Image: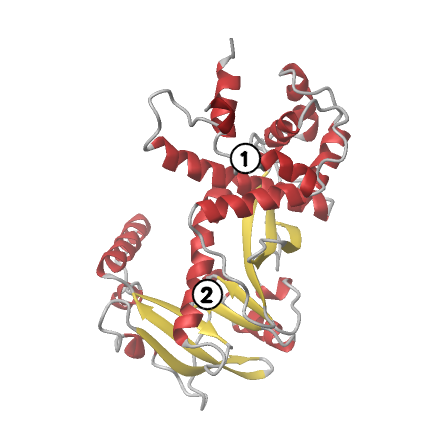
Amino acid sequence: MENATDEDWQVLLSLFPRGWDSLAFGAGAVERLRGFPSTETLLRTLLLHVGKGYSLRETAVQASLAGLASVSDVTILNRLRQAEPWLRRMCQDLLQESGVALPAAPSGRSVRLLDGTRVQEPGRTGSGWWVHYSLQIPTLTCDHLEVTPTKGVGNGETLRRFPATAGDLILADRGFCTPAGIATIQRQSADVIVRINTGTLPLLTPEATDFPLLAHLRELQVPHQAGDWPVSVRSRSGLIPGRLCAVRKSEHAARKAQRHIRRKAQQGGSDPKAETLDYACYVAVFTTLSSAEFSSRQVLDWYRLRWQIELVFKRLKTLAGMGHLPKYQDDSSRAWLYGKLLVALLTQKLIYTARAISPWGYCLSEKDR
């Protein structure tokens, strides 16, 4: 009879994308199952490291105690590196299952989603790290990854940390919204779509006078109404021409955002400013894309895609605090990142499935039917 842990694993297996085991061979993650009885035991061992937050040595011990495999920590690390394309492909399939459409990149463009997450190693004395990463859309290929300490000048989120090539389209959240970062991307002949942060990105008119941001946003009176205005940003190298693209939120979304602001203000002991509550009624982005190439709707749709994936990454960031990051090799760090994303996507699917779970507690697999 299976124990509870094995039974739970069977439930988890039912959530994996169709053909997940054959993907291991097709993606080149498995050439020989030396030390592992099957692809299932290999994946289960890797998830002990990624999902449970065990160190490589602890993972080897736990895998042996569970009767999964008798392998060394070095073997597990090597298999994690080889598993990068396998884990990435499973993430892609699960994203598609969840309804996140990943459209083809615009002609001649490489669309990249930039983000960062903090990782705290286990224990009271564990080190804190920033994981800065860039994912290409729609392949979800991690084309840049860097790890820095959370403490120290210049170690936070910034566009200046990411290399770009001509034709890249960079999608980033408000944490990356600074004139210096935008100027860095522009100098590399790339473009950005970045969420407006009114505290770090003062907007100017094309003539370099102050741009009345809130006054223009208030022109959008109807939910889902979009607007587009020419603006500029001042950097050390001069003015950067661009556009402000904005849309008014639905009444429900606006009220939800305002409630969140009020709750945070109560924790700090002061009332929010009226203009802060007004800004919560809109989504506004700055872009260097020309209106001839991208309409305001297209700009906002691409940013919406970034936000859809960010909803998944929010779970990833929560889970990442549990993990032990391989800090010294890019390939192992990328595989670790995809493993974390896989765990987050499986968690999301488990939540959805649990709402309508069968009376026997799990989904039937093909071999059970």
- Quote the CA–CA distance across marks 1 and 2: 31 Å
Residue displayed at 65% across by 51% down: 148
Q: Which quadrant is home to the C terminus?
A: top left
For this view, does 42 lie left or right of residue 233?
A: right
For this view, does 363 lie left or right of residue 23?
A: left
Q: Position of residue 293 (x, y in %)?
A: 50, 79
Which residue type carries mark 2? Answer: Trp
Residue that numbered label 1 is attached to: 322
For this view, does 326 lie left or right of residue 210?
A: right
Residue 302 bears which disc, if any?
A: 2
Identify the secondary structure beneath mark 2. Answer: helix
Q: Nearer the viewer, residue 272 or 54?
A: 54
Quadrant of residue 133 within the rendered picture: bottom right
Q: Position of residue 104 (x, y in %)?
A: 53, 63
Vertical position of residue 253 compared to residue 181: above or below: above
Whichever of labels 1 and 2 marks the residue nearer the N terminus, that label is 2
Q: Nearer the viewer, residue 60 or 210?
A: 60
Q: Residue furthest top?
A: 1
Q: Residues within 10 Å of mark 1 (few under 14, many from 20)?
A: some
Q: Nearer the viewer, residue 243 or 305?
A: 305
Which residue type carries mark 1? Answer: Met
Q: Nearer the viewer, residue 299 or 252?
A: 299
Q: Tag count in the figure?
A: 2
Residue 128 in view of the camera: no
Q: Position of residue 63 (x, y in %)?
A: 65, 21
